[in-house]
Image (tube, coloured by chain):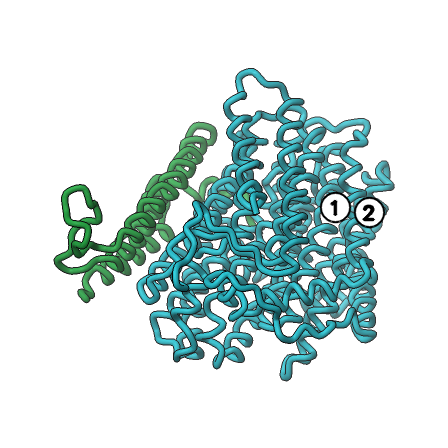
Amino acid sequence: MNLFPFLVAVWLAAVGLYGVVTSRHFVHLVISLSVMQASTYVLLLAVGYRTGAKAPVFADIPARSRIVDPVVQALTLTDVVVEATVSALLLALAVQAHKRFGTVDPDELGALRG
Amino acid sequence: MTLVPLTILVPLVAAGLLAASRPLASRLLADVIALGAAVAVLVMCAILTHRASHGEIVYWWGAWRPHGGVSLGISFAFDSLGAGFATFAAALMVAALVFSWRFFETVDHLYHTVLLVFLAAMVGFCLSGDLFNMFVFFELMGVSAYVLAGFLIEHRSPLEGSLNFAITNSAGGVLVLFGIGLIYGRTGALNLAQIGQTLGHVHPDGLVVAGFALVVCGFLVKAAAVPFHFWLADAYAVAPTPVCILFAGAMSELGLLGVARVYWTSFAGVFGAHEGELRAVLVTVGIVTALAGALMTLGQHHLKRMLAFATVSYIGLFLVGVGLLSRDGLGGAAAYVVGDGLVKASLFVCVGILQHRCASVDEVDLHGRGRVLPIAGVLFGVGALAVAGLPPFGPFLGKALVEDAALGQPGYGWVPALMLIAAALSGGAILRAGARVFLGLGPRGEPDESSDEAREEAEPESEEPHDSTPWLMWVPALALMAAGLAWGLIPDLSHSIGAAAARFVDHAGYARAVLDGVLTTPGHVLAPHGASPGSYLYGVGAALGAVAVAALALIRDGERRLGPLMALRAPLQGLRRLHSGHVGDYVAWLTAGVTVIGGVFMIALI
């Protein structure tokens, strides 16, 4: 097992988290969140990877070929859809914030406290 | 069996129809379709709850059954506790829809559409027998909830509340999925029972513990346990009041259901030897959540924000019940969730009625103006005492069962005393607000910064005060409170909940039912007792404590001389300052919480 992709996943999660925590711009915030979510794609694909195996598409390879795990690929695909929905919603909210209140800084919106 | 898929297909198809018919259909049609679908889900889930009391119901989508004890398909697998929770969520949805009917003067079809999707996600989460599908329903629930929280987007605070809610919970979703990835990497399984079987009873290693810790923390973000709770008050204070009924009554509690479900189906075997350590961690988090939430409740003037923090406090108490990791604790928590959810929903409806009538949700601003609504005042006062644990209401029964379970667990005898303090503080805060608004008691305080915020937040939903309250708004308030009272009076309720909980915690029995299709009876179905005599003392004590807290808070001139509440002032202000409204801080707290809880798990469970 190669450790590298797992380290990449942890790294992506960490930098994404750092971006979310320190962000001063909603669009930057949403992208940071996407980076964080990308870590799960790398993790899932790394979990299902097998050295020297083929893609799990049986159209042009024999049925008993050595393939990578198709389940994690399905999970990743589902996750991409989920993540796209969340990002779209968040970006829509960011657009509203800019349109109505003229700010994209989470601190300047500041209506909720205590 | 054909009922199982219909429980999520009916609301989803109805939601699709509503969205498609948006250009033509009228408001009446939207209300009727949404209400019809919600009632249908309620009836179906109730039937399934009854059927599941004889054994787990397992439904394989597309009939992909397991072969030789190995499952590849996707299942719904649930017992009467899971189905019962789905029923409860559907019941609250019906109440919310009835209340919305007159609460909103104009509302788009999309509101009903999103509510139905939200319902489908909640039901799916309760019934799912597959870890990844739990995640998908969890996210679907999240996305529809973000939309509902920010529904009144033309105003500043709903926009900010929804953003805070969405970002924090998405981070929680990433945690869950990361954990699922690790667990799948170890077991090659996503079916909960299959994971449990593959992990077996071997000694857990770091990978298993990390996966478990991430999934649990992710679900605790949704449940809003401290220190993951910051988003909750922001989201609940700005969401339309009918939506608050669902958020406070069912959504947060589903996070706890997720923790319980994952633990007992998949990890009870592998962590069996370390149950004590896990119990200590979960009960501690629960108690801290209960006390922090109760303190924050005391500091609020915005009625919805106050009820939101009360929700955090009660989540902590439910987590204590779940975290005791025993049949009685879980059963008590289940009874508590329903009892408390019904009464709290009624309180939210009262706030909604008040808001409809007076166009404000601020305690200081509303001083004495609630006198025009005596029925709401009575409901509010009774509700405040009921959530504090006054017998014989539903919350009392649940709290008593959790307390008895804690007393039955060696070394946890101190838990009921702290539960009493938390319940008295949060109940007292609600009672204080009620006395000020409906009776005009206490001095007419000058509005502070939190009430400015309240006024701004109140604007969106009802800009104009109304002269009368439509009867359709009273129906859910009275019905929910009556149901909350009835819940505590159902004979043998503690027995049937105990039996359901016994099945829920039966790790081996669940695996047999799912993987082999064999229904077993849990071994130790002793008749669990009802509330013990001692718990009546605790219940009355908490209610009296709530009255005392309310009275102390109302006597303002003596503030400096009143030792007990003054002592709370400094920690309260420190605590309030932490709730900065800045989402970066919330995620930083989340990271810290995951690090600490994960670290403790790593040390304690390996």
The number of discs equals 2
Location of mark 1 (residue): B346
Judging by colour alone, the chain drawn in cyan in this rendered image is: B
Tell me what residue is drawn at x 36 percent, y 64 percent.
B183
Please say if the residues under marks 2 and 1 sit with CB atoms less than 8 Å apart: yes
Helix or strand or loop: what does disc 2 sit on?
Answer: helix
**Taking B42 as reference, is B71 above or below it?**
below
Helix or strand or loop: what does disc 1 sit on?
Answer: helix
**Taking B9 as reference, is B299 above or below it?**
below
Q: Colour of chain A?
A: green
Q: x%, y% of residue A69? A: 25, 55
Q: Left or right? Give the position of B231 relative to B378.
A: left
Looking at the rendered structure, whether the residues under marks 2 and 1 are on a common chain is answered as yes
Closest to the observer, B133 or B147:
B133
Q: Left or right? Give the position of B347 relative to B290.
A: right
Q: Quadrant of the C terminus of chain B?
A: bottom left
Closest to the observer, B563 or B218:
B218
Residue that lies at the very extreme toward the left in this rendered image: A52
Residue A6 in view in this figure: yes
Tell me what residue is drawn at x 44 percent, y 79 percent.
B604
Tell me what residue is drawn at x 83 percent, y 67 percent.
B540
Q: Which of the marked residues, 2 or 1, is nearer the chain's N terminus?
A: 1
Location of mark 2 (residue): B379
Q: Residues within 10 Å of mark 2 (few under 14, many from 20)?
A: many
Tell me what residue is drawn at x 50 percent, y 61 percent.
B517
**Taking B513 as reference, is B405 above or below it?**
below
